[in-house]
Image (cartoon, rainbow, N blue to C red):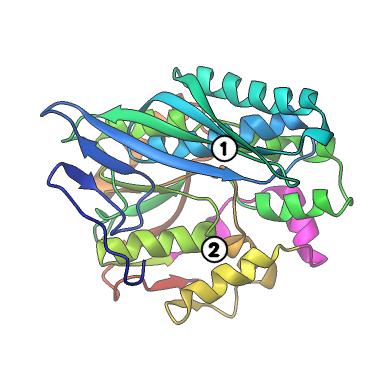
Amino acid sequence: MGNLSLKRGEELLVGIETSDDAAIYRLTDDIAIVQTLDFFTPIVDDPYLFGQIAAANALSDIYAMGGEPKTAMNIVSFWPKLGYDILEQILRGGRDKVEESGANVIGGHTVEDKEPKYGLAVTGIIHPKKIITNSAAEEGDILVLTKPLGMGILATALKGGVVEEEEIMDAIDGARKLNAGGSAAMREIGIKACTDITGFGFLGHLFLMLKASQKGARIQANEVPVWDKAVEFAEIGLVPGGAATNRNFLGENISISSLVSDVTRDMLFDPQTSGGLLICVSRDKLDNLLESLGKQDVLSSAVVGEVTGNSAGFIEVV
C-alpha cells in the first residue's frame, strides 16, 4: 500500500501483508472472526442470478480461510431509473445465497450510481489454531482446483451479445455455487494452505500464494479444467482485458512452455468471478482430500500441479 502504514495489534492473526483472502482477528483463545468485503458490476443479465453470484463470490473468501460465515451486509450502488424491482431481485438473490450458507443478512448501505454494483461485507468465525492461509504452502504439496476456469471469457461473450445466458448456464451455476463443500473437505483433512480464484485469475492468485509462502510451482496446463464454451470464445478472441493485466502483473515470475496453446494461456490468466478453491495438500493426504471433495459434490477435483522450491512466486507452466 505504498507509504500508507497500518497499525497491527497482536490479536490480528491475518492482515494485509500476504494479500490473503480475508482478515482474521482473535477474540478469545477459541474464537476468531474472519472478515472480507467484495462487490462488482453485473457479469450476467438476470438480476437474481447476479445477486447470487456476487454473494457466493464474497462468501468464498471466508471458505478459503476455513471459516464459517455468520453475518453479511449488503453493499449496493444503484440507479433508481432502472426500477426498484430489479434492485429487489438482486438483493433477493444475495439473501438466498447467504441464507444457503447458514449466515444472515443483517443490513447494508446503498448509494445512487448509474452503473449498478453489488456485493457483501461478510463476517465469519474460526478457531484461531485452525486457520487456513495463503502463506502455508510447502514444497511438494499437490495443487487441487475445485471449479473450472473461463468465467471471465464467458462474461465477455455475454456482454458482447454473442451468447445467451441459457447457453452458459453450467458456468453460471458454477459461479453461484458456494465453496462450502471444498472448505468442509479442507477442514476434515487438515489442510493448511488455500486461496480462492477470482479477479487475478488462476495464475495471479497462485502467484500471491507462492509469494506469501516463499515457494514456487509447476503447473500442468492440460490438467486445468475449463468451461467448454469458454474455449470456443477464446479461440475467436473474446478475452477480457483483465487477462492481459493479470499477465503483466506476474512480470518475469512465470515461464510458459511453447507447447501451451494461446487459448490455454488465456484461460490461466482469465479473471474469474466466484471461482473455485486452489488447495495445497501434502502428497500423503491427497487421496483423502479427493475422496472428501467427492463426497462434498464440488464441481472439480482436478490435480493441476505441485509446489516447488523455486524462487518465491515463480511459476513454471508446462
In terms of depth relative to the viewer, which is nearer, 40 or 114? 114
Q: Residue at 50% of width from left, 72% of height from top?
A: 249
Mark count: 2
Q: x, y (%) of residue 270?
A: 62, 60
In terms of depth relative to the viewer, which is nearer, 9 or 154? 9
**In the image, residue 212 above or below residue 163:** below
**In the image, residue 139 above or below residue 131:** below
**Where are the magenta residues, as a range?**
219-238
Q: x, y (%) of residue 32?
A: 22, 32
Q: Residue 274 carries which label?
A: none
Horizontal side of 115 relative to 211 (left or right) equals right
Q: Residue at 78% of width from left, 65% of height from top?
A: 235
Q: x, y (%) of residue 77?
A: 65, 40
Please rate how many residues cluster around mark 1, counting C-alpha atoms within 10 Å: few if below 14, some from 14 to 19, many from 20: many
Horizontal side of 206 relative to 155 (left or right) equals left
**In the image, residue 11 above or below residue 91:** below
Q: Distance between the residues labelled 1 and 2?
A: 32 Å
* Magenta span includes 224: yes
Q: Mark 1 points at which residue?
A: 119
Q: Quadrant of residue 240?
A: bottom right
Res 209 seen here = yes
Q: Residue at 41% of width from left, 71% of height from top?
A: 315
Disc nearer the start of the sequence (1/2): 1
Horizontal side of 281 relative to 46 (left or right) equals left
Residue furthest out toward the right = 162
**In the image, residue 313 above or below residue 15:** below
Q: Which amino acid does label 1 sit on?
A: Gly
Q: Nearer the viewer's eye, disc 1 or disc 2?
A: 1
Res 131 seen here = no
Q: Mark 2 points at which residue?
A: 221
Q: x, y (%) of residue 267?
A: 63, 61
